Amino acid sequence: MKAYLDKVTQPFELVATLDDGDKSRELHGLLVEIAGLSDRITLSTQGTDQRVPSFALHKKGEPTGVAFAGIPMGHEFTSLVLALLQVGGHPPKASDELIEQIRALDADLHFETYFSLSCQNCPEVVQALNLMAILNPRISHDAIDGALFQGEVEAREVMSVPSIFLNGEPFDQGRMSLEQILARVDTGAAEREAARLGEQAAFDTLMIGGGPAGAAAAVYAARKGIRTGVAAERFGGQVLDTLAIENLISVPRTEGPRLAAALEEHVREYEVDIMNLQRAVELVPGEPGGEHEVRFASGASLRSRTLVLATGERRRVDLEGVFVQIGQVPNTEWLVDSPIELSDRGEIVIDARGMTSVPGIFAAGDVTTVPYKQIAIAMGEGSKAALGAFDHLIRS
């Protein structure tokens, strides 16, 4: 923590609301320790928040919009550290485009997120909303440990975490990225992005899907020096919902979200255009040697000389309560009316090079007929499909 707080460049204050309870004493001890690690951080116990124990981050005597109700340890400790750094002037890792989009939001938005300290999906939501609050004075966010505020949890009928409320009304549940949240609150974002994508020149190879297969294919294609893009509903795919991964060779143990972040970081080392929040709905194959077109639910469309279809399996049955996983189905409904050959299970039929029944269109990973749906296998299949696409390009 000391090493992280050395990066704080601007002074701010931790304003705590406490009582005589054990949890308040525990929180007070944590905040005293944090304030003692940097001369740019001060602590006040004069807070008047309705939730006890809690603390807010203030800057120049004014709230930054970021508050924690409870003690953000466990998986939320990272959220706490990032909030301290960002309020203290350390630049966020978000792209310049996302930062400007947040700052341009012209509405009063008060978010509340109920989390648990053992929830692996909660930090991404908490961190995204904290960043929005830090960047835009019209946005605020309270991150609430549901275990300490059971009355609120019951009154609001919170059934799972993370549960997000906006201006007092239910907003969403489950993992959400910063891009997904912005797409919900910035009503014109989808139309602007669709228009931008429609102006893109055709790619040499385009990956549809951002899981292990799509990511591996993107890296292999980009290393060949060809114009490469990835269009995905959410980068990382099923990996984001996987808790423990212990069979990825050379990596004894990791967690899905961590692996997904590493995949994206690797892809971004190359000149790959990553287009998130894009769910494919239609494939329009081109003539031999021509361009194929993929249309998306957002209204966007992209063209490419070759395609690698890596849409994986599922994104789950939505229920009011508990659901049981009984199997998975390939994400190929959007291909039913296309000339792409599918198996009786709906999987994409491919040859030894990963090519489908349509020349120039390749497929990889769990969406194909290749047996054994594993991350390591998907990565290899994605690499093979990218090499197949490159070979097709140079031969045609």
Image (spheres, grey):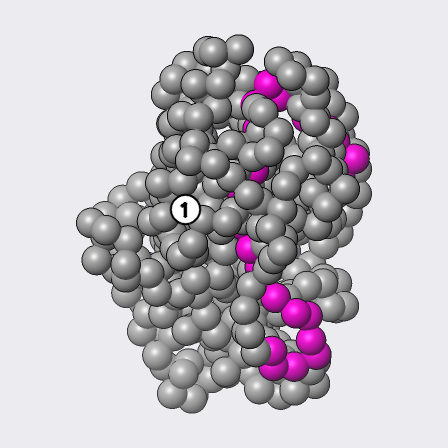
Which range of residues does the magenta coloring cover?
298-323
Residue 124 in the image: state x and y as whole percent: 50, 55
Q: Which residue is more in the foreground, 312 or 273?
A: 312
Q: Indicate the quadrant where residue 154 lies.
A: bottom right
Q: Quadrant of residue 309?
A: top right
Q: Is residue 388 above or below residue 259?
A: above
Residue at 28% from the left image edge and 61% from the top image edge: 246
Q: Name the foreground residue: 68 vs 192.
A: 192
Q: Is residue 151 left or right of residue 271?
A: right
Q: Which residue is mark 1?
A: 378
Residue 121 sits above or below residue 338 on the image: below
Residue depicted at 70% across the width and 50% down the height: 333
Relative height, residue 40 to residue 361 (above, below): below
Residue 395 visible from this viewpoint: yes
Q: Is 199 displayed left or right of 366 in the figure?
A: right
**Hey, what amino acid is under mark 1?**
Ala
Q: Where's residue 202, x and y in %?
A: 63, 17
